[in-house]
Image: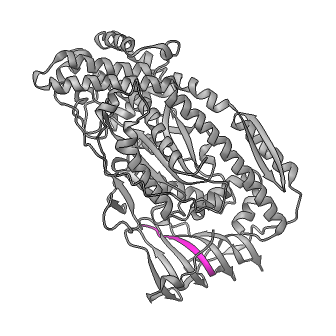
Amino acid sequence: MTLCTVVLLSACAGTATGKKSSVYQHDASVVAIDASRSKADALVVIRYPAVVDRQSVDSYYRAFANHAIGGKVRVDQQYMLQASKIAQAVIAKSNYFAMTLYRVLQNELPAQSVLLSPHLIVADEQGQLRSEALLAAEEIPSVITIDFNVYSFPDADKLMDAPPLTFGDIVTPMFVVHSNRWLQPSTHGLLLSSGPLLPTAWAQSRKQADAQFFSRLEFEFGARDRPLDFITFLTRMPASDTDIPRKSVGVSRRDIIAVEDYPLEKIRMDGDIVARLAQDRSVDPFAIDFVNGAATRIERALNRVDHDRATFFNRQRALARFDPDLAIAFLSQTRNPEMLSRLQLGETLVAAEKRFLAAQSETLYNGTFDGDYGDQMRQMLAAELRLLEERRDLARQQNLNSALAVVAIVGSIAASSSGMDSGLSNSTVSNLLVLSSIWAMNSAMDANAKSKILNENFLVQMAPAINQQVSVQIEWLESKREITAFGFEEFRRKTQALYQSTVRSIDVAFDRQCRFAHPQMEDHGVWYGGCHAGLASATGYGLITDGQGLSVEYVGGAQSGMASGQGAMILRSPGEVGAVYMEGAFSDGLPDGVVLIEEPGRKPRVRTFKAGKDVGRADADQLDRVQF
């Protein structure tokens, strides 16, 4: 039985319906407030799968087929041909729908505070997938990061009735919201995740937190780059997720320290608006039916978290690119006037890099959503809707012509995201349908030959965003300077050169042998900060681990090598899920006084401690918080 016949006989089983409203509802009264004291950070970075490496498409198809979300599927040659086309559609449509999320958040949040980070999907020699950022947006400190994509069940036999589907007026969004571990230490910085991605997102957040901890333990400031959670999910799914602290959307236990579990939603957008997309893009149905509500959820998250705590360590990493000593000074919270001047210049230049990348994001949005790519996608969605409406009307008649049209439109999606760059911008939907219908009925055509040039046209459209000329004006010491560059690499070279030519050599020594200790550990750790007689003193940052899984990370005051005074501490114990966060008063390495406690699966609470022992409730007004 040919591929065409299989789909013709099976695609008539359903009517492709979805829920009319998302669990996330828009609230226009919610306004995000940028509470950060730094201008060198973004509020949101949006990551999404943008393109698959030419040599990695087969690995991507296999992973997509073998790790289906929404049900079990067979794996054979005919199925793989079907799945490859749907896999291409997931990338093409994730590109498109990510732009709506960007535009809505950009309109809701302060200017230049939302950055785009498209990812390239690649495979190693063993066929294991990973993703790599195509732009430098993730090198800018950000309060939160969103991993976004849309999804379809990878079986054309169930195209019309599969639980997850993105086709016509149906869309299945998936996203993860995460940050540096210090934003919410008990969950390794993971705030929210689509249900199917939650185990992967949890494992990635934990791994990222560990990598950053051990790099700073060695006085190294490069952090492990985090692949897209969706791509990591396709490569290796964690075996169990039973211990992850989670909570449902909108539950009364909202204050519990846990990861919000976003359910897999198949949302049906407003069909009348989708039908007019090709002629009128002024109203975006995806924004109305999902993104506006999701943006409200993001804004609430931004209003609930400490922005400076969330970006503190990423700001340190960004400063290290200019000067490693500067990064150490930042962690030590030095008050040396000359070093403070360096810090001010470093943050000014990071802020300039953010503005450059914000301009790149705007150009990328214009090229993707407002350009030829967006026009083709809107025509595609409208054409898909027409076929779905016909299919819905004729469901009882098992109309074969309608099923054939479904096959054709799947092929058209593949064509629109392939490397047919010479004619894509001028092609009409009808031409694509003709080409793809021929493909669907000709089993001898080599589908893999087309798939290997997947999304090259998108890379061509991205080139102006990556290599555009941008000018950014900075203010330093009551003077103004303008930096102009083609592409971010040239811009960074100029910011680094400006830093090196401006700063003076100063003699500020930091003792790398300075010891930080904890009463529960025999060994000592490292200390970034003031030092007296070889022991941590004054303010700074310390880390220590016993190598068996117990670790301590601390920001604040110290005396005689241990946490003392006002501070914040993260403790991880072997075998325990998540971590314990304590903030308040410390003495001899232990909580002593009024302390805030955050633990996974519980509400935050303010308690009174004496020599490390909890002796009862405390008044929250007496809590002395750390200023990051």
Position of residue 49 measured from the top left corner of the image (x, y, whole percent): 48, 36
Seen at 62% across and 31% down, the residue is: 465
Q: Is residue 362 left or right of residue 9?
A: right
Read off the magenta span.
565-575
Residue visible at 82% across and 50% down? 499
Residue 319 versus residue 331 in the image, above or below: above
Figure coloring: one colour
Compared to residue 554, the image places residue 506 above or below, namely above
- Can I make out residue 129 in this image? no
Which residue is rendered at x = 44% and y = 33% of the image?
A: 282
Q: Front-most of 197 and 141?
A: 141
Q: How many marks?
A: 0
Quick one: 235 or 274, which is closer to the camera? 274
Spot occupied by residue 292 in the image (x, y as percentages of width and height): 41, 47
Whole-percent x and y of residue 466? Answer: 64, 32
In magenta segment, residue 574:
yes
Secondary structure, magenta segment, majority class: strand
Which quadrant would the C terminus be assigned to in this image? Answer: bottom right
Q: Is residue 218 left or right of residue 272?
A: right
